[in-house]
Image: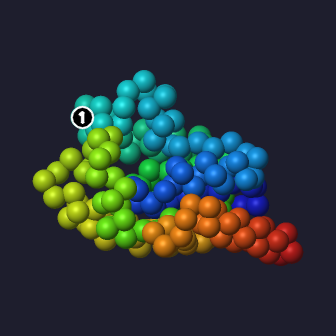
Amino acid sequence: MKLNGNIFLIGPMGAGKTTIGRLLAKALGVAFVDSDKEIEQRTGVSIPMIFEYEGETGFRKRESDVLASLTQTCPIVLATGGGSVLLPANRDYLGERGFVVYLQCTVDKQMERTHKDTNRPLLKTENPRARLEELLAVRDPLYRSLADFIVDTGHFSSRSAVRQILRAFNRSRRILKEA
C-alpha cells in the first residue's frame, strides 16, 4: 500500500462497492470511479455486450487496461469489478497503488442485492446462487490476500462501513508516515 490517498474497493458483486465508494469519496472530497462504468464509457457498450462479443477473457483484458490507468490517478476512490482480482497484474496495481478494502458479504446478501439486476452476465445461469458460491470460493482467498482492511457489509449499514474504512485508512496513513 502506498501513502497516496487512494482507496480501492474489492469484493463480490452486490457487496456495496459502488454505494460505499460514493460515500467514501464524498467524505474524503476526492473523485469516485466505478471501473465497470469506466469500461462502458470507454467502449461505448454495456458489460453484457462485451461478454457477448468478446467473452470473459476479452472483458478481463479491457478491465486490466482500465485498472492500470485508474490506479495511477491520485487521490481516488475506486470500486472494482468482482473479478478484477483474478489477474496477477491487477492485484499488483491495486496492492501497490492504494489502500485496498475488501467489502465482504454472504451469498444470501448478494442474492438479495443482485436478483433483479440484468447487467450481470455471470449470473445469467439457471442457478445464480450456485454461481455466486463458485465465484466466492475462487475469489475470497484472493480478496483476503490483497486486503489492507476487511468490512462485512452484510452486517453494517453503508455509513457505518464508511466510518470503519475511514478509521482504518487514517490509522494506516499514520503508521506509514511514522515508518
Estimate the x, y position of residue 35 in percent, counting from the top left: 51, 43
Q: Is residue 51 left or right of residue 171?
A: left
Quarter-of-image position of residue 117? top left
Q: Quadrant of the C terminus?
A: bottom right
In the image, residue 166 sits, relative to residue 50, either above or below, namely below
| Residue receiving disc 1 | 52
Q: Residue furthest top?
A: 44
Rate crowding at label 1 as few (under 14), some (14 to 19) or many (20 or more) other CA atoms within 10 Å.
few
Task: Name which residue lies at 75% across and 52% down.
Answer: 28
In the image, residue 131 sits, relative to residue 176, either above or below, namely above
Estimate the x, y position of residue 66 in percent, counting from the top left: 52, 40
Q: Is residue 103 left or right of residue 172?
A: left
Estimate the x, y position of residue 165 in percent, counting from the top left: 65, 66
Name the kind of residue labelled 1 in the image. Glu
Residue 56 versus residue 167: which sits nearer the camera? 167
Q: Quadrant of the N terminus?
A: bottom right
Q: Is residue 58 visible?
A: no
Estimate the x, y position of residue 77 in percent, counting from the top left: 64, 50
